[in-house]
C-alpha cells in the first residue's frame, strides 16, 4: 500500500465534471453587484457635475452620462444569460395506419 497523495483526497472542493451553469443564487448575486455598481456611478457623476459647474461643457457631460445609468442598470440587472439549446433525445416511432381499406360512409 502506498501513501501517495493521489490515493486519498483531503481537500473538500468537489471536482467539476459537467459544464453546469452557475446556480440561480450566484447568477442573481452577480447581477445585483452589477446593478449596485452602475447605480453607484451615478452619484459621483452628479457630484463631479457640481464640482465642474464653471466648465459648463464638462458639467453637462457628467449630467448626460448620469441620466441613462438607472435605465441601463435595470436592463443589465434583469438580463439573464440565454438558455443553452439542448437537443433532447426522444423516441420517435414510425406512424402507421390502423387499417388500410376503404370505409363506407352513410349520410343521414
Image (cartoon, rainbow, N blue to C red):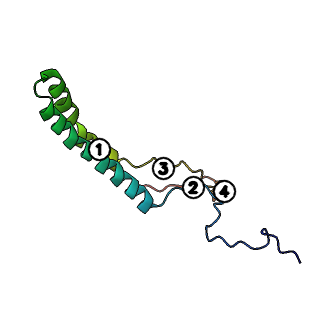
Answer few, some or many: residues within 10 Å of disc 1's Cα (few below 14, many 20 plus, some between 14 and 19). Answer: many
Element carrying mark 3: loop
Which residue is label 1 attached to? 38
Nearer mark to the viewer, of 3 and 1: 1
Which residue is label 3 attached to? 83
Which residue is label 4 attached to? 93
The answer, for residue 81, to whether it is visible in the render is yes
Q: Is residue 99 above or below residue 63?
A: below
Which residue is label 2 attached to? 103
Residue 104, position as x, y percentages in the image: 55, 55
Answer few, some or many: residues within 10 Å of disc 2's Cα (few below 14, many 20 plus, some between 14 and 19). Answer: few
Q: Is residue 41 left or right of residue 23?
A: left
- Residue at (77, 69) in percent of width and height: 5
Answer few, some or many: residues within 10 Å of disc 3's Cα (few below 14, many 20 plus, some between 14 and 19). Answer: few
Residue 80, position as x, y percentages in the image: 40, 49
Nearer mark to the viewer, of 2 and 3: 3
Amino acid at each position: 500500500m502506498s501513501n501517495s497523495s493521489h490515493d486519498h483526497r483531503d481537500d473538500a472542493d468537489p471536482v467539476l465534471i459537467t459544464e453546469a451553469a452557475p446556480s440561480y443564487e450566484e447568477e442573481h448575486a452577480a447581477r445585483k453587484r452589477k446593478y449596485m455598481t452602475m447605480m453607484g456611478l451615478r452619484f459621483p457623476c452628479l457630484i463631479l457635475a457640481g464640482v465642474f459647474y464653471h466648465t459648463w461643457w464638462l458639467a453637462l457631460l457628467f449630467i448626460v452620462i448620469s441620466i441613462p445609468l438607472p435605465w441601463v442598470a435595470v436592463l443589465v440587472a434583469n438580463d439573464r444569460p440565454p438558455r443553452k439549446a439542448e437537443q433532447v433525445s426522444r423516441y420517435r416511432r414510425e406512424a402507421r395506419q390502423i387499417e388500410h381499406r376503404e370505409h363506407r360512409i352513410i349520410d343521414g
